[in-house]
Image: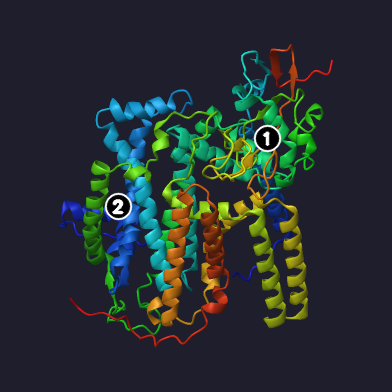
């Protein structure tokens, strides 16, 4: 260390210009980090999609793309609908009370999580880490599933299971039920996913 | 500035050129410091080849990568096809690509063995803490590099693997979902994600990796290499010859450079055998589902990361809401022990209680999913702290109590079992075993300050043990 006394005014200006430089550096970082955000094009791709459900038979499921995600439309059989309330004790959040606003729009916050009980509409992305669960509609014992399986969905990534209303079973990695996207019926056979004009 | 050296006018052209350069750039000085006069302990064994080998694999990855980029197209619509184009239509493209894909796995094989060597011989202990920390940072960068590189072929495993790992970030409370969006650049993994991962994989991470490798080697050459006996050969009390060179050291070049060339030959035999005869390694190096183009609507029935990530992936899966109770019990037990047994001022004991209560409150209020991510990240991050966790009076496993060897053996076994379970589909028994394995993994490190001091170490010799051959 040198013995020269500290020139405090020089030091003050050094600190001040250092701070000014740092502020400039941070400000320049903003546009760079901003480029990581979804582009305008990606945001625009979130438009609503129409689905024709007239050909869907009871017990069948179809998938449409909305915002790059699979949206499932399933026509549930009366037996499948009847089984839903019986499952409540086995489910983590049967009434979808944990995060109601994120899980489903208001008109789908009911026992079947749907507008029309027959049709389930849900985003087919597991709430754990974003895999797409597979269909396990066959009831009864089978690998990776309990013996009293009532039909539903099984996520191959981490083993979460969902019932036919997209409700997650207890003690599984997924914390929440499958998301129900905003949707509305344009007619009996036309379903619009992504929009729900309350007109 | 160094003194300007004049050279005899009768010197040869080569000498004159070298002198000209040395007066302007420390070429000879660097060569001496890092090669011909870098003294390394003479008792290195088999375990000391993996450092050089990882440098070799790094070079292989960079060179093959440069050539792959000449044909690859980072576009969600074209990527899968361009990889198949490299495999089928580019002359010898398949060889370059298999070198790169096998190189990724080879990198982790040599790096894991290199790290295990450090663990066995205490190579992270004072004064080599920074060598170890730079090394851990290299490991972390390598994982990022491998993960982002795996998305590029745009197969099913690429796509869904990236989807799962990026979604890990969305488990972080408050900022998570926005952070995941920022990483993907779209609402799902898509073209934007592929493009940015490509940029990171070929430019950003390799630059960081190279910088870290240089830092790792500079730090190593500053403090000198450790050895299987954990005895310092360069300390003030270490025996030296008339020139001040350590008696137990030999110059890196030619002694270890030749030694490493032998290792390189053996390594390349194995490496090329895999490239030519088993480039997919039965689905371990290149997963079968990755030969199917990415389909955002269909998750493959079984998805698992590539083998080198599976131990940490097992830890992620092990943390379920049930497991949280076990973890809370561990935190409470740790706090109680700290308060009752710790020789600390009351202020610190109070701090321990407050911290433990805060952690338990967070563990109860935040999803198990988030803690799974914490466990996965913690499994890697905990390695950084190893120099301060190991309190054993001796460095090398050779002179530690015999049961420490069993401890390390169980640790290795545990790591392998976690790795194996991480490849399997989720199951009840596997889940329980990986929960026990995860507890052991963290217990091994977190309790190390206690167990590493137990037992009677064997006497450490003054000089390295070496028999001339």
Residue at 70% x, 58% y is A11
**Up-down relation of residue B209 to residue B454 (above or below):** above
Q: x, y percentage for residue B160? A: 52, 37
Residues packed near mark 2 inside 10 Å, few (<14), some (14 to 19) or many (20 plus): few
Q: Indicate the quadrant where residue A107 lies.
A: top right
Q: x, y percentage for residue B32? A: 30, 63
Label 2 sits on a secondary structure element that is helix
Given the image, what chain letter belongs to the residue carrying mark 2? B
Q: Nearer the viewer, residue B22 or A61?
A: A61
Q: Quadrant of the N terminus of chain B?
A: bottom left
Residue at 31% x, 70% y is B39
- Left or right: where A184 falls relative to B468: right
Q: Tell me whether marks 1 and 2 sit on the same chain.
A: no
**Up-down relation of residue B93 to residue A170 (above or below):** above
Mark number displayed over residue A166? 1
Q: x, y percentage for residue B46? A: 28, 67
Residues packed near mark 1 inside 10 Å, few (<14), some (14 to 19) or many (20 plus): many
Mark number displayed over residue B21? 2
**Up-down relation of residue B433 to residue B302 (above or below):** below
Q: Indicate the quadrant where residue B101 lies.
A: top left
């Amino acid at each position: 260390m040198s013995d020269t006394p500290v020139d405090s005014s020089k030091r003050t200006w050094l600190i001040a210009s250092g701070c000014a430089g740092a502020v400039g550096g941070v400000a320049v970082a903003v546009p760079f980090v901003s480029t990581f955000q979804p582009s305008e094009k990606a945001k625009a791709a979130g438009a609503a999609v129409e689905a024709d459900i007239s050909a869907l038979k009871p017990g069948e499921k179809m998938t449409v793309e909305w915002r790059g995600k699979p949206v499932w439309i399933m026509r549930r059989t009366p037996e499948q609908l009847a089984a839903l309330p019986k499952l409540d004790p086995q489910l983590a959040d049967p009434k979808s009370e944990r995060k109601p606003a994120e899980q489903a729009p208001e008109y789908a916050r009911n026992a079947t999580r749907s507008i029309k009980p027959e049709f389930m509409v849900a985003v087919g992305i597991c709430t754990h880490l974003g895999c797409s669960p597979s269909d396990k509609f066959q009831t009864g014992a089978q690998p990776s599933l309990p013996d009293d399986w009532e039909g539903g969905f099984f996520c191959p990534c981490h083993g979460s299971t969902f019932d036919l209303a997209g409700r997650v079973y207890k003690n599984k990695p997924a914390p929440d039920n499958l998301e129900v996207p905003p949707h509305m019926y344009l007619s009996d056979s036309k379903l619009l996913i992504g929009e729900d004009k309350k007109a | 500035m160094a003194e300007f050296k004049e050279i005899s006018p009768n010197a040869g052209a080569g000498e004159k050129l070298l002198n000209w350069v040395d007066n302007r750039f420390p070429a000879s000085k660097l060569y001496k410091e890092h090669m011909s006069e870098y003294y390394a302990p003479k008792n290195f064994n088999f375990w000391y080849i993996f450092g050089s080998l990882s440098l070799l694999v790094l070079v292989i990855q960079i060179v093959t990568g440069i050539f792959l980029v000449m044909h690859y197209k980072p576009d969600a619509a074209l990527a899968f096809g361009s990889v198949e184009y490299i495999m089928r239509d580019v002359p010898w493209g398949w060889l370059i690509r298999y070198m790169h894909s096998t190189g990724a796995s080879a990198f982790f094989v040599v790096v894991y063995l290199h790290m295990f060597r450090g663990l066995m011989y205490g190579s992270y202990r004072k004064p080599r803490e920074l060598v170890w920390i730079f090394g851990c940072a290299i490991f972390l960068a390598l994982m990022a590099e491998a993960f982002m590189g795996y998305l590029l072929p745009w197969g099913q495993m690429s796509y869904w693997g990236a989807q799962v790992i990026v979604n890990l970030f969305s488990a972080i409370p408050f900022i998570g979902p926005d952070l995941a969006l920022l990483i993907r650049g779209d609402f799902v993994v898509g073209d934007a994600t592929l493009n940015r991962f490509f940029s990171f994989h070929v430019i950003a991470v390799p630059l960081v990796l190279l910088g870290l490798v240089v830092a790792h080697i500079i730090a190593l050459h500053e403090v000198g290499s450790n050895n299987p006996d954990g005895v310092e050969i360069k300390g003030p009390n270490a025996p030296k010859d008339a020139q001040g060179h350590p008696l137990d050291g030999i110059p890196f070049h030619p002694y270890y450079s030749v030694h490493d060339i032998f290792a390189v030959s053996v390594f390349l035999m194995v490496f090329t055998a895999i490239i030519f005869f088993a480039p997919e390694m039965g689905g371990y190096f290149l997963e079968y589902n990755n030969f199917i183009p990415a389909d955002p609507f269909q998750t493959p029935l079984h998805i698992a990361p590539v083998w080198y990530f599976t131990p940490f992936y097992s830890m992620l899966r092990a943390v379920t809401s049930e497991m949280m109770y076990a973890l809370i019990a561990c935190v409470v037990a740790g706090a109680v022990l700290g308060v009752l047994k710790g020789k600390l001022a009351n202020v610190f004991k109070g701090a321990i209680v407050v911290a433990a209560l805060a952690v338990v409150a967070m563990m109860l209020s935040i999803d198990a999913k988030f803690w799974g991510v914490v466990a996965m990240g913690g499994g890697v991050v905990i390695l950084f702290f190893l120099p301060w966790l190991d309190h054993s009076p001796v460095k090398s496993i050779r002179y530690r109590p015999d049961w420490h060897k069993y401890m390390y053996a169980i640790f290795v076994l545990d790591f392998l079992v976690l790795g194996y379970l991480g490849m399997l589909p989720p199951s009840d028994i596997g889940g329980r075993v990986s929960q026990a394995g995860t507890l052991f993994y963290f217990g091994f490190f977190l309790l190390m300050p206690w167990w590493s001091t137990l037992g009677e170490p064997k006497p450490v010799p003054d000089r390295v043990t070496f028999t001339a051959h």
